Image: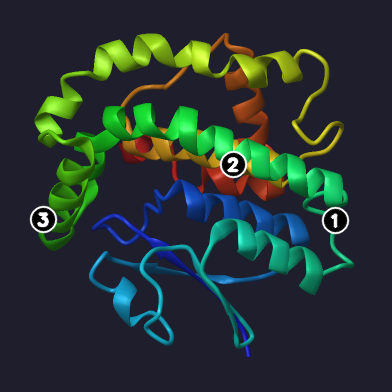
């Protein structure tokens, strides 16, 4: 048996750009679990494992299937108790739930709008057609119209990270002295932007940028396996 993580990937088969997949790539490394990261397209998702999944990540852990990033992390915490903790206990798990909710409600929408055209450019023609239809329905406008809001969204984005900045003024990680899954949740968003955008999402002197660089160095620098030169 083996551990397989299914990941939405660019047309080149190398650039795994899903923020939710990156949470789990980091969580697996954190736990010391070796896994095959298997690239899929949008069209492939319906055929993953038992065919019941509609999005990625999907994890097959030696026959145990999970298809939600947070539930995958909970599974890893239970299944691999000898590895470093992802939550630091029930309180940390509850805190990570808040961080996930904050990330999806406050950070994801503007990044999605800013990155839409760049994501589209990375995809195969079939994925481009699917992505355009799905995102334009979500946005209520064309990808080009969403992209036209980029400068406004980018200008407003640093303020949305103020809660993270306040925490990092007192400790190196959201998890305290060591990173936890809460860190990987927000790391996934910035990694998504790093892989898809031709420019940094935040200024280099932002404390959040320094935290992100520390995240990129974790676990043998796995976050740097997709380099800026790939843009």
Quickly name the residue at label 1.
84
Closest to the camera, between mark 1 and mark 2, is 2
Q: CA distance from mark 2 to mark 3?
A: 29 Å
- Front in this rendered view, residue 211 or 104: 104
Q: Examine the rendered structure and indicate whether residue 84 appears above or below residue 229.
A: below
Q: Residue at x 51, y 17 (%)?
A: 160
Quickly name the residue at label 2.
100
Name the spot of residue 1 as percent of width and height, x first: 63, 91
Q: Residue at x 84, y 62 (%)?
A: 83
Q: Is residue 143 left or right of residue 81?
A: left
Quickly name the residue at label 3.
129
Q: Which SS class for mark 2?
A: helix
Q: Residue at x 84, y 54 (%)?
A: 85
- Front in this rendered view, residue 218 or 82: 82
Which disc is residue 4 wearing? none
Q: Which SS class for mark 3?
A: helix
Name the spot of residue 102 as percent of width and height, x first: 57, 33
Q: Examine the rendered structure and indicate whether residue 113 appears above or below residue 45.
A: above
């Amino acid at each position: 048996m083996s551990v397989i993580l299914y990941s939405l990937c660019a047309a080149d088969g190398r650039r795994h750009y899903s923020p939710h997949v990156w949470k789990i790539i980091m969580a697996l490394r954190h736990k010391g679990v070796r896994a095959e990261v298997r690239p899929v397209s949008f069209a492939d998702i319906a055929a993953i494992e038992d065919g019941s999944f509609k999005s990625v990540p999907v994890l097959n852990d030696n026959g145990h299937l999970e298809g939600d990033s947070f539930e995958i992390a909970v599974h890893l915490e239970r299944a691999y108790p000898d590895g470093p903790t992802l939550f630091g206990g029930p309180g940390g798990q509850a805190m990570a739930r808040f961080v996930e909710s904050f990330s999806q409600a406050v950070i994801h929408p503007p990044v999605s709008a800013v990155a839409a055209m760049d994501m589209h450019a990375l995809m195969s023609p079939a994925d481009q057609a699917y992505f355009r239809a799905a995102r334009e329905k979500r946005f209520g406008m064309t990808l080009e119209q969403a992209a036209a809001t980029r400068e406004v969204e980018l200008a407003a984005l640093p303020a949305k990270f103020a809660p993270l900045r306040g925490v990092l003024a007192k400790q190196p990680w959201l998890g305290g002295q060591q990173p936890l899954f809460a860190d990987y949740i927000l790391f996934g968003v910035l990694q998504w932007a790093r892989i898809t955008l031709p420019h940094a999402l935040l200024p280099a002197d932002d404390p959040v940028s320094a935290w992100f660089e520390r995240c990129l160095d974790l676990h043998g620098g796995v976050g740097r396996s997709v380099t800026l030169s790939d843009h």
